[in-house]
Amino acid sequence: MQPDFPITDLLFQFTLLIGAVLFVQVALERIFIPGLLGLLLLGMLLGPGGAGVLEHEPVVDLFGTVGLVYIMFTAGLEIDLDIVREHRAETFGFGA
């Protein structure tokens, strides 16, 4: 019996996404590739714009939003505030 795509069962979507995220994180850490890159590729592959395994459902939208927040949080951790202070005028000009 072959599965129907896109998957519409919310519980199966959630289980598939959590399992894939955990697998990708562990697999990529072993080959020294950043996990964030794997998560982005996984989202492109499984999402509605990729292979179409998942369609626009509340679970997919929720994980997409959480993923964007995670990317912004990670980018915020990478900011060197000493460099921002050195280039204060350029920083505020660009921000404005």
Image: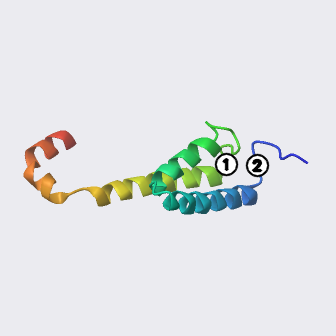
**Based on the displayed image, in which of its 4 quarters is residue 11 positioned?**
bottom right
Residue 81: x, y in percent? 17, 58
Q: Secondary structure at mark 1?
A: loop
Q: Nearer the viewer, residue 58 or 83?
A: 83
Is residue 96 visible in the rendered image? The answer is no
Eyeballing the image, is 44 above or below 70?
above
Q: Would you say 77 lies left or right of 56 here?
A: left
What's the mark number on residue 57? 1
Mark 2 and mark 1 in contact? Answer it, CB < 8 Å. Answer: yes
What's the mark number on residue 8? 2
Q: Residue furthest front?
A: 31
Q: Would you say 74 lies left or right of 93 here?
A: right
Going by the numbered disc 2, the residue's amino acid type is Thr
Residue 23: x, y in percent? 61, 60
Mark found first going from the N terminus, 2 or 1: 2
**Based on the displayed image, in which of its 4 quarters is residue 24 positioned?**
bottom right
Going by the numbered disc 1, the residue's amino acid type is Glu
